[in-house]
Amino acid sequence: MDNAVKYIISNEYQKQQENSPLRDVVYCIDKNFLLGAGVSATSILINSKEKYNFHFFTDYIDNHTLEKFNLLAKNFETNVYIYFIDSAAFAKFPVRAKWSVATYYRFIAFHYLSDKTHALYLDADVICKSCPDELFQLDLTGKFAAIIPDLDIVQEKCEARLGVTGLAGKYFNAGVIYINLSEWQKQHFSEKAISMLSDKSKEFSFLDQDVLNILFQGNCVILDNKYNQIYDAAYHFGLKSLSNYKETITDETIFIHYTSGSKPWLQWMRYPSSTYFDIAWKQSPWSNEPLLDAHNANLLKSRSKHEFSQKNYLRGIWTQVRYITKKLSDKLS
């Protein structure tokens, strides 16, 4: 585990000052989520009065992206650290269509940041909508983390699925976690998580999220869902009004979690609910770059559905052609 991080690139424009702690924020990503993570970090910086260290654990980096992250640090006078991970260490771990091997990098990140006491972990598809600073005042003494329960539909079968009594109603979504890193090290959770995932006799439908729920059970601070307001882009299908998102994303919402495969950094996701991503994107080093196109068959299929829903019929037909072509190409390769 100690050898999983091959090298670190530091971009430091903020120094630790007495009586003014630097807050640590962690992202674990692959190539497809670099833009999302960069904009997510920007969204925190434009809404918060705190000072930060941002830690990006990734298995892909290039010179262009390094320049963008350096600009992020320089423009906002913050610190950005990039940790290049050897993904081979996780080659035998299970993955899903929605989650790549990068979902496991948090176990390396939390172990590697052993000199820190607390950190805010965010998925790359989480956008800060309003000031998050109150979160950092939480007292986690003796607690493993502060978490937000997942959707009711996820809660229903979690006890039977994982064999953990009392978990229903407390099963949390792992996209936003304020974690007590001192307790993480004390409990040897990285080693325990890796051991659980290496056990081929057990299956975890939600991968690392299931493992974290088992490890943390009964010893977390439970937060309001304003800190992890889940919003599924598929909700747009069949809506009579595009303003319906306001029923989910409210004035009280602090973090929006854009779940499902259709992320706000994709070209066809130009809905009012993506406004909060757009605000941060336009103030980020990525503002002069186009949003991302569909790069695989699943995204092409999703793009086509959204385009038809948006009454962009010609564009939807063209995307359907691209989807069929890509699917045939994948079968032949």
Image: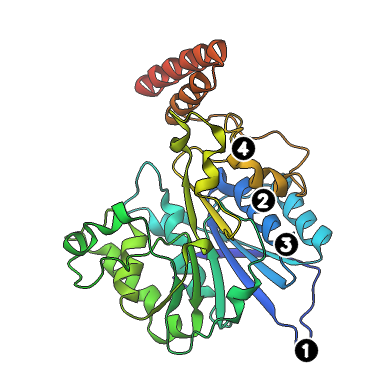
Label 1 or label 2, whichever comes before in sequence order: 1
Label 4 or label 1, whichever comes before in sequence order: 1
Amino acid type, residue under disc 1 in the picture: Glu
Label 3 or label 4, whichever comes before in sequence order: 3
Query: Which residue bears the numbered disc 4?
Result: 272
| Residue 14 as seen in the image, left or right of residue 172 | right
In the image, which is nearer the foreground, mark 4 or mark 2?
Answer: 4
Checking the image for residue 45, the label placed there is 3
Label 3 or label 2, whichever comes before in sequence order: 2
In the image, residue 279 lies at what x, y percent?
A: 72, 46
Query: Which residue bears the numbered disc 2?
Result: 39
Label 1 or label 3, whichever comes before in sequence order: 1
Query: Which residue bears the numbered disc 1?
Result: 18
In the image, residue 162 lies at what x, y percent?
A: 21, 63
Q: Which residue is drawn at 67% across and 61% down?
A: 44
Amino acid type, residue under disc 4 in the picture: Pro
| Residue 179 as seen in the image, left or right of residue 206 | right
Q: Residue at x 46, y 15 (%)?
A: 320
The answer to whether 192 is drawn above or below residue 308 in the figure is: below
Disc 3 from disc 4: Cα separation: 22 Å
Q: Which of 59 and 188 is in front in this view?
A: 188
